[in-house]
Amino acid sequence: MDKELVVIGTVRSSIKEVKSAPKMEDEDGAVRARIEMDPAYAEGLDGLEPGARLELFTWFHQSDRSVLKVHPRGIKERPLRGVFATRSPARPNPIGLHRVTLVAIEEPLTLVVEPLEAIDGTPIIDIKPKPKGR
Amino acid sequence: MDKELVVIGTVRSSIKEVKSAPKMEDEDGAVRARIEMDPAYAEGLDGLEPGARLELFTWFHQSDRSVLKVHPRGIKERPLRGVFATRSPARPNPIGLHRVTLVAIEEPLTLVVEPLEAIDGTPIIDIKPKPKGR
C-alpha cells in the first residue's frame, strides 16, 4: 500500500523558527494558531464544532529522519536515549501529535486552535477528535 | 521534504481481520499483541522499559484513503460525518493512534504490548512515550 503522506493543511503561526518554539504544546510559548486547510479535504471537516478537543497530527518537515538517539530535550548532559523513548521531533517518521482546542472555524477553511507549538508552515497530516477521558 | 513513511515494525496479533477487531483499544476484544521491530531501528528503542505507557502509531494499510465522510462507527442510521470529526480508519492519511502499556521486551527486538486492536500485519510507523498526566 502507498505510504506517501498527503498534506491536508498548513500551520500559520507567529512562531517562525524551531529555536523559538517550546517543546510541548502545554509549555510556555505555545500560541493560538491557524490551520489553513487544503480545499480538497473540506468535506472531511463536517461535524467539527468550536470547543472540540482535537488531536492534531503534524509532519516535522525540518527534522533529521536519520537520527535514532538523542539527548532528551536537547540537553547535552543527559545521556543519549533512543528516539522511541522520547518525543524528540528527530525520528524516522517525524510525526508530531498535539492536543489542542478548536477555538473557531473561519472562512475560508481555516481552523483556529490553541495551544500549539508547531512552527509556521508545518504540514498537517491528520485531525482526530480526542477520545473522552484521555 | 520527503513524506514517504518508513515501516519501523509490524504488529503480530491473534486478531487477523478488520471485521473481528474492536474499534478502539479500550473496547472488549483488544488483546495482548507483539510488535516485531525492524532491526534497522533497534537503537531507537534504547531506554524503553516494561511498564511504560506508550503511544503507538500505526498505518491502517487496508483503509480507503479516498473517503472524506463516514457513518460514525459504521452505523448506517447515523448521519454522515467528516472523517476529521471521527476516528474512522478511512481517511486521507490512515494513521492509527493507540495507547498501550509495554508489557515486556523480548529477543530479538520484539515489544509485547496491550491492549491493542490493530490487526496482524499492521505496519508500525512511530512509538512515543505517553506524556504524564494525559
Image (cartoon, coloured by chain):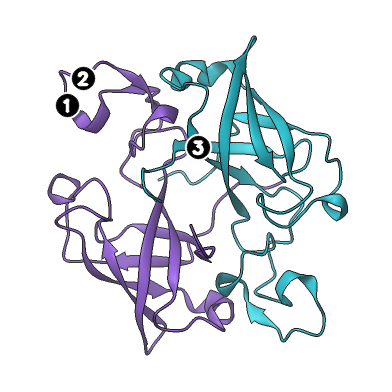
Chain colours: A purple, B cyan
**Disc 2 crowd, CA 10 A, few/some/many (<14, 14-19, 20+):** few
Instruction: State left or right for residue B128 relative to residue B124.
Output: left
Q: Nearer the viewer, residue B59 or B117?
A: B117
Comparing B52 with B34, the one in front is B52
Q: Is residue B90 above or below residue B113?
A: below
Residue A24 left/right relative to A86: left
Q: Is residue B131 left or right of residue B90?
A: left
Residue at 75% x, 84% y: name it: B78
Badge 3: how crowded within 10 Å, few (<14), some, or many (20+)?
A: many
Looking at the picture, how far across and down is residue B134, in whole percent?
41, 51
Residue A66 x, y percent position in the rendering: 40, 26
Q: Amino acid at mark 3?
A: Leu
Identify the element where label 2 is drawn.
Answer: loop
Q: For the residue marked with disc 2, what is the amino acid?
A: Arg
Tell me the quarter of the picture where residue B34 sits: top right
**Res A78 label:** 2
Would you name the residue on which mark 1 appears? A75
| Snapshot quadrant of residue B4 | top right
Q: Which residue carries the number 3 mark?
A: B54
